[in-house]
Amino acid sequence: MKINMDRIAGMQRIPGILVGIGTQLLFLFTVWHLFHFLNGRHSNGEPGSLWIDVLLTMQYAVPHSLLLLPSVKKRLTKFIPTEFYGSFYCVATCLGLLVTFFFWRSNPHDVWRLEGVPRVAAQWMFYAAWGSLLYSLSLTGLGYQTGLTQWWYWLTKAKQPRREFQPRSLYRFLRHPVYLSFMGLLWFTPTMTVDRLLLALIWTGYIFVGSYLKDERLAYFIGAPYREYQTRVAGYPFIFFGPLGRRHSHTRRAEPLVFPESLKPNQPKRAA
């Protein structure tokens, strides 16, 4: 009996197709719960020890950065196809967030509770932070954040183009608009409970550490062009010194900057 090799090859792709679809559904499910969690639903959780909340914030933050380290990624891609590493990272991130949401312990004591116009203003600033977050992600490719883009090129058997980053829009004024937007989600709340303050403080600290690690990661892959970008643009507004301010350098080079997914250290940077 003649074996239809094309059919067998097509059947072998089914697990990859299911992984890609499942990842995106999990991402949407997580974003829905993230919105309600940061919008106050966490306050309805069962009261409990704040130490549980500390552990929950850390179990998300630490792996979230470790999985992006070049050395960790290099080891894991020995077992995970490169085209699916974005999906793997997205799933790990979503699971870490969902564990935080579902096991969070609330605290009934308020740090502040706004009323009237200030309450409405804080709520609208929360919504604006969501808009800024989505816009910032779109500037560098939301699909790369969820693994959708890498998976789509695998699905269509097309060659993934090299990612180039032309500093534009928000990235002309700060290096980390995504992190800054997420910080807004943490602090723009009409009611700040003790447990919510704990979350905001720990994740804000993680955001600054993560921003530094991201700078170093991009500089590792891109090299001198990214360092030059750091001399022109600060990481955040009103930070005038340190690793998240403008870096001091006597070397200036031209754009464009190329994102790391398609490059290795010391590999020549060419236009797509």
Image (tube, rainbow, N blue to C red):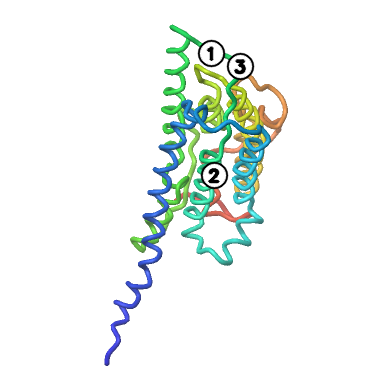
Q: Residues at badges 2 and 3 in contact (C-beta under 8 Å)?
A: no
* Mark 1 residue element: strand
* Disc 3 crowd, CA 10 A, few/some/many (<14, 14-19, 20+): few
What's the residue type where badge 3 is placed?
Val
Assess disc 1: are there few (<14), some (14-19) or many (≥20) residues with their C-alpha within 10 Å of its C-alpha: few
- Kind of element beneath mark 3: strand
Give the Cα separation between the discs numbered 2 and 3. 25 Å
- Give SS at disc 2: helix
**Alpha carbon separation for disc pair 3 and 1:** 7 Å
Q: Quarter of the image holding residue 193?
A: top right
- Position of residue 141 measured from the top left corner of the image (x, y, whole percent): 43, 42
Question: Viewed as shown, does residue 153 lie left or right of 237?
Answer: left
Is residue 68 at least partly visible in the picture?
Answer: yes
**Disc 3 designates what residue?**
111
Residue wearing tag 1: 113
- Left or right of 161? Residue 5 is left
Query: Which residue occupies the foreground of this view, 259 or 115?
Result: 115
**What residue is pinned by disc 2?**
99
Q: Which residue is drawn at 60% across and 19% down?
A: 109
Q: Residue 47 versus residue 76: which sits nearer the camera?
A: 47
